[in-house]
Amino acid sequence: MNVVRGDRRKLGKQALSFAVVIGIWFAPIPAGLTSEAWHLFAVFAAAIFSVVVNAFPLLTASLLAVGTVVLTGTVDPAKAFAGFANSSVLLVVVAFLVAHAVVKSGLGRRISLLVVSAFRRSTLGLGYSIFLTDALIAPAFPSNTSRGGVLYPIILSLAQSDGSNPEDVETRRLGDYLMFCSIASLSVSSAL
């Protein structure tokens, strides 16, 4: 029963997102704007709206928006997909995909348990283990942005496996410390 209600709510949010794009698309165009600019605004306003209300994931909303502006002739395909040719954009997208895979597959938890077994003696040892983990994955991910996307789920799993909870003032201290260590590690390794 709850699954059906959740599905209906999700479909309602998705329909509302499409209603937003149609509503803005056919609204009177403000003075000083071309119809292409107004239609582009309509599509991306609806895409942002759909992500905010959790109707679609960010990647899905982005691809729907780009596909819509290309299929409606608002923007030519070369311009629409030019951003995907930028290596920095691809690096960040791949980092998020790898980070998602690290979380979904349980690899982050496995690595964190391996780190805990080797450095469990103290929180200082756990901090050093984060620097060591960052150094080990640095050759595979030369960008500190992409390395942060891979390192974050490992640190999160490490903190959670030790019972650190961000909502609890008493238990979140270890997680705070480990996240600070990962930020420091990324800063040091990116400067080298």
Image (cartoon, rainbow, N blue to C red):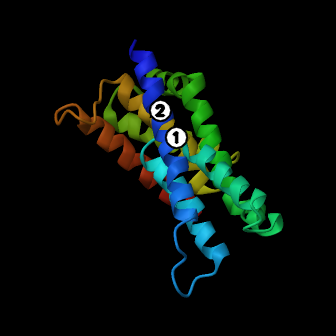
Q: Is residue 111 visible?
A: yes
Depth check, front residue: 78 or 108:
78
Query: Residue 87 location in percent, x, y?
Result: 74, 61
Q: Is residue 117 left or right of residue 41?
A: left
Which image quarter holds the C terminus?
bottom right
* Above or below for 38 versus 110: below
Depth check, front residue: 17 or 157:
17
Q: Is residue 53 left or right of residue 59?
A: left
Assign a secondary structure to mark 1: helix
Query: Residue 36 location in percent, x, y?
Result: 67, 74
Which image quarter holds the N terminus?
top left
> How far apart are the two marked residues, 1 and 2, measured between alpha carbons?
6 Å
Quarter occupied by residue 26: bottom right
Query: Residue 52 location in percent, x, y?
Result: 43, 49
Residue carrying label 2: 10
Depth check, front residue: 85 or 176:
85
The amino acid type, in three-letter code, at marker 1 is: Gln
The amino acid type, in three-letter code, at marker 2 is: Lys
User: Do callouts 1 and 2 mark residues in contact (Cβ within 8 Å)?
Assistant: yes
Q: Is residue 142 visible?
A: no
Query: Residue shown at 58%/82% (left/top)?
Result: 33
Q: Residue furthest bottom?
A: 32
Decide: few, some or many residues near mark 1? Use Cα within 10 Å; few <14, some 14-19, many ≥20.
Answer: some
Quarter occupied by residue 56: top right
Q: How many marks?
A: 2
Query: Residue 183 location in percent, x, y?
Result: 43, 52
Query: Residue shown at 63%/53% (left/top)?
Result: 92
Q: Which mark is residue 14?
A: 1
